[in-house]
Image: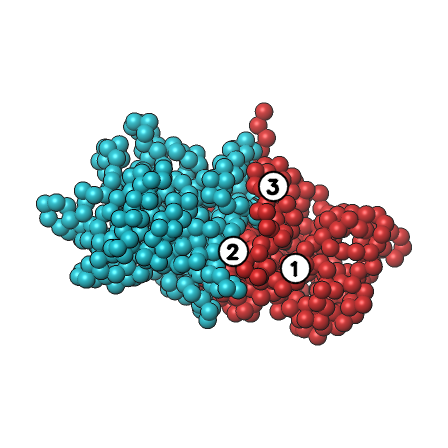
Chain colours: A cyan, B red
Amino acid sequence: ESERIGLEHGAGGEATRKLVAETLASGFGDPEDAIVGLTGMDDGAVIPVGEENLVLTTDSHVIDPPFFPGGDIGRLAVSGTVNDLAVMGATDVRALTSAMVIEANYPVAKLERIADSMAATCEEANAAVVTGDTKVMGNGEIDGIVINTAGVGVAPHVTPDSAVEPNDVILLTDSIGEHGISLLAEREGIEFGSDLASDVKPLNDLLARALEVGGKNIKTMKDATRMGLAGALNEIAEKSGVGIEIREERVPVTSDVKGAGEMLGLDPFQIANEGVAVLAVAPKSAENVLDELREHPKGENAAAIGKGIDDHHGRVVLDTGIGSRYLREPASEPAPRIC
Amino acid sequence: ESERIGLEHGAGGEATRKLVAETLASGFGDPEDAIVGLTGMDDGAVIPVGEENLVLTTDSHVIDPPFFPGGDIGRLAVSGTVNDLAVMGATDVRALTSAMVIEANYPVAKLERIADSMAATCEEANAAVVTGDTKVMGNGEIDGIVINTAGVGVAPHVTPDSAVEPNDVILLTDSIGEHGISLLAEREGIEFGSDLASDVKPLNDLLARALEVGGKNIKTMKDATRMGLAGALNEIAEKSGVGIEIREERVPVTSDVKGAGEMLGLDPFQIANEGVAVLAVAPKSAENVLDELREHPKGENAAAIGKGIDDHHGRVVLDTGIGSRYLREPASEPAPRIC
Ligand SMILES: Nc1ncnc2c1ncn2[C@@H]1O[C@H](COP(=O)(O)OP(=O)(O)OP(=O)(O)O)[C@@H](O)[C@H]1O
Ligand SMILES: Nc1ncnc2c1ncn2[C@@H]1O[C@H](COP(=O)(O)OP(=O)(O)OP(=O)(O)O)[C@@H](O)[C@H]1O
Ligand SMILES: [Mg+2]
Ligand SMILES: [Mg+2]
Ligand SMILES: [Mg+2]
Ligand SMILES: [Mg+2]
Ligand SMILES: [Mg+2]
Ligand SMILES: [Mg+2]
């Protein structure tokens, strides 16, 4: 019989993890000296280089359409990789790669816009593309453009997604759901207020500020991408071996996102963000870190949304105000090519 | 008017360089501390991390068909990136990334073969994939599978493609043309002897041996990929600001490659290799390095094929035995999706 790849394998959740663990990455052994290896299944890997913790990460970007409200594939490609570095603790981005696979007949003018956007986002993130690759596939062999970015950074203090302890405070840097919901609204041709736009942005500047204040009391950081906030929290809870309790009313969701989400049948907790991170901070530093986040333009909406608990290990409990239920990660992809 | 991308932009030659320099990478500034930055347009970039020279490189692989005589896209993806690191001097591969974009409906059994091949090639190269990404595009939105690999390594002695001086000896590690010609023969459905197969292989073990013997007398190394040996030599000559003189009869070409090349109208000098490197070595070390290469199974066919000259600056002169002519890099892509 012949098993075949489905869209769910690209959704970043259970199906992806299973495919990666059992097939795509089953033959690779972690280097002996890896600080966070492939088996960590974290936002990036960490290996020692000299005295430094070198963080390495990669993402391919297949978003459709490549130009969307609030951003484009170039801004996404830089932000996505910068953020995976930053949430591992490497807010100091040392270098990025840019590898483009382009469909024959693609307009050069669009490439110019994409390249300009990458350059501007690099400047914003104080990052530099130092090497790349360009391949062309025939017309009809690839739909437009795919951009892979890999990145390296240095992390004085590594923040894996597995280090939350009971009572650690869960901070969220921004309101949720904007990237995924605005993209899908755009695809459906539905117009909401002009405020509905992707949240795509590099977070390393913001997270560097948080680390300055919180230091090693910041235990875990993770960007809430493909599987949304629900996915990120579940992964953190499971890997940390603690429960996480979230107070629903504390999670910022804009009214545009709420409205559009209802219309599209999409839960803002379960959809991709591209400029939102979760932090777990020891109680004694939580308030300071939150204040620092809020002082930064990218952290204005930051909130303390919950805490680690020594119960419901590996699961996320959502306190809705009228009761509580498990917050599960989305079962399969809400939509393909969202990032 | 609307300029559009053509297959030539993915060929790795003049059109690619122009697109990269004028459009795709025009907005990126090199980090101040870069040892080899993007402007070097070399096989990889080199940046300082602690006391080390960290080499970073990336390549996307779009080869069609993904399984071909002598290899597959998995072996290619690992070898290609390992070789770009190795020719920069980073034969010590610290880590690789693997980012796959897969067409919906792709058979999992094929992914298993590809993953096994990547793992085996990693073992051969003493390299490890430590992080990756998996995206799925819809059926018909991408033709099969595209794999991007990025890599980092440490180079005690950096060997850029721009350091050749007059009288340096040009060494070639293997016979040329096998990858491209076998692939195109396969595509055309033409059968030649069973010996006609891709040369795809990681070269870091071989080049590490050369560096042990030659040390800093090895000035330049470069893998002769998309633009073939002619492309690699021209780039080296131009960047080094010297001429390079090649004795045609010294360049090993198997009779199968010669025969198939004639039949297909392809020049072995002008077609992709995926396991062949060019070295430029100071005269006093050249013989030792060549002997060392020849003792290694991957260097059995190694040869001294020419030298740097203080004439014809930036160009490659081919001595055919009956006269001499410039060896030019291929004007455009001999064939798409060859790597
Ligand atoms: N093809 C692959 N080979 C090896 N490892 C992989 C592969 N695909 C994913 N991984 C690993 O699986 C884990 C989860 O990957 P995923 O891409 O979901 O993380 P992410 O990049 O943080 O999220 P997103 O892609 O949504 O931004 C990571 O540790 C990643 O290194
Ligand atoms: N899209 C891009 N953005 C930035 N730099 C690029 C891009 N494409 C190529 N480059 C740069 O152009 C130079 C040539 O790239 P090229 O891919 O031809 O080298 P290579 O990987 O050694 O060859 P091959 O891809 O045939 O193996 C490299 O320095 C590379 O970093
Ligand atoms: Mg991540
Ligand atoms: Mg990511
Ligand atoms: Mg390349
Ligand atoms: Mg190269
Ligand atoms: Mg290459
Ligand atoms: Mg990813």
Task: Say which chain tag 1 marks.
Answer: B
Q: Which mark is residue B20?
A: 3
- Please provide percent x and percent y for residue A277: 33, 47
> For the residues marked 2 and 1, what is the alpha-carbon distance in whole angstroms?
21 Å
Task: Say which chain tag 3 marks.
Answer: B
Q: Is residue A272 above or below residue A157?
A: above
Which badge, 3 or 1, comes first in the chain's sequence? 3
Q: Which mark is residue A310?
A: none
| Residue that mark 1 sits on | B158
What quarter of the picture does the N terminus of chain A occupy? bottom left
| Front-lying residue, A19 or A159 | A159
Which badge, 2 or 3, comes first in the chain's sequence? 3
The kind of residue on which mark 1 rests is Val
- Please provide percent x and percent y for residue B39: 64, 45
| Residue that mark 2 sits on | B149
| Front-lying residue, A290 or B34 | A290
Seen in the image, is A287 located left or right of residue B88?
Answer: left
Mark 2 on the same chain as mark 1: yes
Mark 3 on the same chain as mark 1: yes
